[in-house]
Image: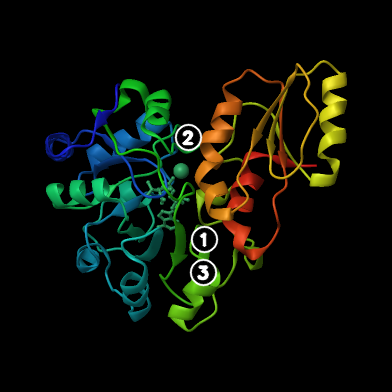
Amino acid sequence: MTPRPADAVAIHEAAQLLKQGRLVAFPTETVYGLGADASNAEAVRGIFAAKGRPADHPLIVHLADKSMLPDWAAEVPASAWQLAERFWPGPLAVILRKKVSVPLAVTGGQDTVALRVPNHPVALQLLQAFGGGIAAPSANRYCRISPTQAAHVAEELGDAVAMILDGGPCQVGVESTIIDLSGGQPRLLRPGQLSVAAIEAVLQQTLLLPEAVSEIRAPGMMAVHYAPVTMALLCPAQDLAKLAQTFLDGHQRVGVLAYQQDLPAHPLLVVEHMPDSVAAYAQALYASLRKLDGLQLDRILVEQPPQTEAWRAVNDRLGKAAVAV
Ligand code: TXA
Ligand code: MG
């Protein structure tokens, strides 16, 4: 499937395809999504088939505007309105108790639903043209690296999708922050670009963080996810050169996702240098991992970036893509 430039005609056609129950991949500010009509259980089942995703993994419903929250949530608590007011359109999803009318196919059988208004002109135009909610996971095959460019979607899903709208590379590069507001203390289920502090400031309440919770609620929080096929190791900066040399001495082809270390050139070594700032690093992360993964290497070494709060989302994704050494 060749991606289509997302002009007004293509967006209109994409909305018609969604109404017919077909699948459309589209850009958001975080990653590309694989969309279906969220009110059509049969169409939603097509998403799970195309991704090879287990049916109990819930999807995020994308909306054109926060005013549509009451169409999907049984109750919209004040906290949800506050976050929506401050951060939508933007890279944030909230989990609320679902309305009876929301298909269980969307929520993986749960009585809660994830909702978000994405901040991308193509996504918003598509949502407006379509008029309803679009269920959309990241447009990759199950457990693989999320796509941040239209070409990645074509690689991942081929002809399983009726149209791929090309809106250029995604600006944020890692998936949305997910906050569970379905009961009790608000919980961070998945870190993203928005900082915990910014969210707590709006809620005027502390968030329950994943490290404080043992039970796994979001499949995106499982150990293997967002992973390259090539064996990847997450390695402290000071050990990187030595570890790379060990593999090179063993005649292995090594890819390095480098942050600040410089490695001496070697015929079996490919180094992908990552940007300094967390925003630029996050934006480039999946494309860089995907590039290294496509080179038939024996091993990918990832240089550990800073382990500070600002890097929470990046470190979360690296922890899922690579095994710490
Ligand atoms: O940035 C994003 O959120 C992207 C773009 C396309 O919007 N979408 C995305 O979808 O990352 P997906 O399906 O790859 O990840 C959705 C996450 C999963 O970890 C899922 O478990 C969680 O949202 N989720 C959805 N509904 C939930 C629910 N009712 N309760 C708990 N977690 C839920
Ligand atoms: Mg995903």
Q: Earlier in the sequence, mark 3 or mark 2?
A: 2
Q: Residue at x 82, y 21 (%)?
A: 248
Give amino acid for label 3: Arg
Using a 10 Å C-alpha cutoff, classify the residue at mark 2 as few (fewer than 14 neighbours), some (14 to 19) or many (20 or more).
some
Q: Which mark is residue 211?
A: none
Report the number of numbered marks.
3
Snapshot quadrant of residue 43: top left
Give amino acid for label 1: Leu
Residue 306 vertical position relative to residue 225 in the rendered view, above or below:
below
Q: Is residue 26 left or right of residue 248?
A: left
SS assignment at label 1:
strand
Task: From the image, tell me which residue sits under label 3.
Answer: 187
Q: Quadrant of the N terminus?
A: top left
Using a 10 Å C-alpha cutoff, classify the residue at mark 1 as few (fewer than 14 neighbours), some (14 to 19) or many (20 or more).
many
Q: Is residue 181 left or right of residue 269?
A: left
Q: Residue at x 17, y 52 (%)?
A: 132
Give residue 215's position: percent from left, percent from top. Answer: 60, 60
Nearer to the camera, 116 or 97? 116
Does the residue at mark 1 contact the one at mark 3 (Cβ under 8 Å)?
yes
Residue 300 vertical position relative to residue 82 in the rendered view, above or below:
above
Give residue 35's position: percent from left, percent from top. Answer: 28, 41
Q: Which mark is residue 189?
A: 1
Nearer to the camera, 62 or 27? 27
SS assignment at label 2:
loop
* Protein image colouring: rainbow
Does the residue at mark 2 contact the one at mark 1 (Cβ under 8 Å)?
no
> Outermost residue, bottom direction?
204
Q: Is residue 22 left or right of residue 255?
A: left
Label 1 within 8 A of ligand 1 by Cβ: yes
Q: Which mark is residue 142?
A: 2
SS assignment at label 3:
strand
Give amino acid for label 2: Tyr
